[in-house]
């Protein structure tokens, strides 16, 4: 039980870094963080996921450039949702592992000295993260917690790409969908139709009944002047659908 709880908590920490830092801040520039908070999220991303931010950003921006048409890195409309759900890692690597595409879609995020020394060494970040779990909980619980976290994080991220382009509500006229139950587990990412309608909005809950669990963190951080939200009004990319 301890391993399950610890794995879930670590997974949610990684999801917070993904949605607030990788997605809303870097990919869409909906948020600007103070340098110290940016560094905190860089470390958190590094030790919980091993992701290189510029690669994640490149994959996501390409998805927005070619949503559910040829060129989309992970479209369930083209591949079928099971192929995306269970093959998301491989689909991600096709773009993330291509330096030319990373440069094209994340040219504003060139490697800096911290990337060269630490953050580009994914294996080291993951080793640090797993070691912290083992030191905190002991070897067996720590390793099991790491396995739980890995399964949850990868599965939930794949679900955002696969399920929220297949099942759910479409209040706006785009091919993504809203699934509130998935939004609870992904700190707002399941409100994917809303996000595609207003990609520069830092807040994903755009209708009554929508709950974006990352928004309280963003709102409080803004009040504390830890970050700045780009738009306080919703900037719709597409018109409201039926």
Image: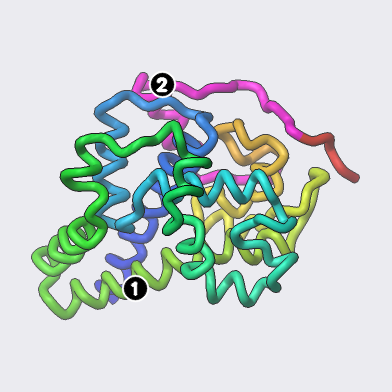
Q: Which residues are magenta?
A: 208-237
Between circles 2 and 1, the one closer to the viewer is 1
The residue that appears at 54% across and 48% down in the rendered structure is 60
**Which residue is the extreme one toward the front?**
100
Where is residue 28, by image quadrant?
Answer: top right
Mark on residue 148? 1
The residue indicated by pointer 2 is 223
Q: At which x and y percent is residue 67?
A: 70, 51
| Foreground pick, 170 / 213 | 170
| Foreground pick, 189 / 49 | 49
**Which residue is the extreme one toward the bottom?**
140
Q: At which x and y percent is residue 156?
A: 50, 64
Dominant secondary-structure state across the stretch colored magenta: loop
Q: Is residue 240 left or right of residue 90?
A: right
| Foreground pick, 200 / 185 | 200
Q: Against 77, is 60 above or below?
A: above
């Amino acid at each position: 039980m301890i391993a399950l709880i610890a794995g879930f908590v670590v997974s949610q920490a990684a999801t917070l870094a993904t949605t607030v830092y990788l997605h809303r801040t870097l990919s869409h520039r909906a948020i600007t963080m103070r340098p110290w908070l940016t560094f905190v999220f860089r470390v958190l991303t590094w030790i919980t996921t091993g992701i290189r931010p510029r690669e994640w950003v490149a994959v996501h921006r390409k998805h927005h450039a070619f949503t559910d048409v040829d060129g989309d890195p992970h479209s369930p409309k083209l591949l079928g949702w099971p192929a995306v759900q269970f093959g998301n890692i491989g689909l991600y690597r096709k773009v993330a592992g291509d330096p030319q595409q990373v440069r094209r879609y994340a040219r504003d995020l060139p490697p800096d000295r911290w990337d060269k020394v630490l953050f580009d060494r994914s294996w080291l970040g993951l080793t640090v993260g797993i070691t912290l779990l083992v030191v905190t909980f002991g070897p067996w619980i720590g390793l099991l917690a790491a396995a739980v976290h890995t399964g949850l994080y990868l599965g939930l991220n794949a679900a955002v790409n696969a399920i929220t382009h297949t099942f759910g509500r479409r209040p706006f006229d785009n091919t993504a969908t809203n699934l509130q139950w998935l939004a609870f587990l992904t700190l707002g990412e399941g409100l994917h139709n809303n996000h595609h309608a207003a990609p520069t909005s830092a807040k994903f809950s755009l209708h009554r009944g929508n709950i974006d669990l990352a928004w309280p963190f963003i709102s409080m951080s803004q009040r504390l002047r830890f970050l700045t939200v780009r738009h306080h009004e919703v900037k719709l990319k597409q018109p409201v659908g039926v």
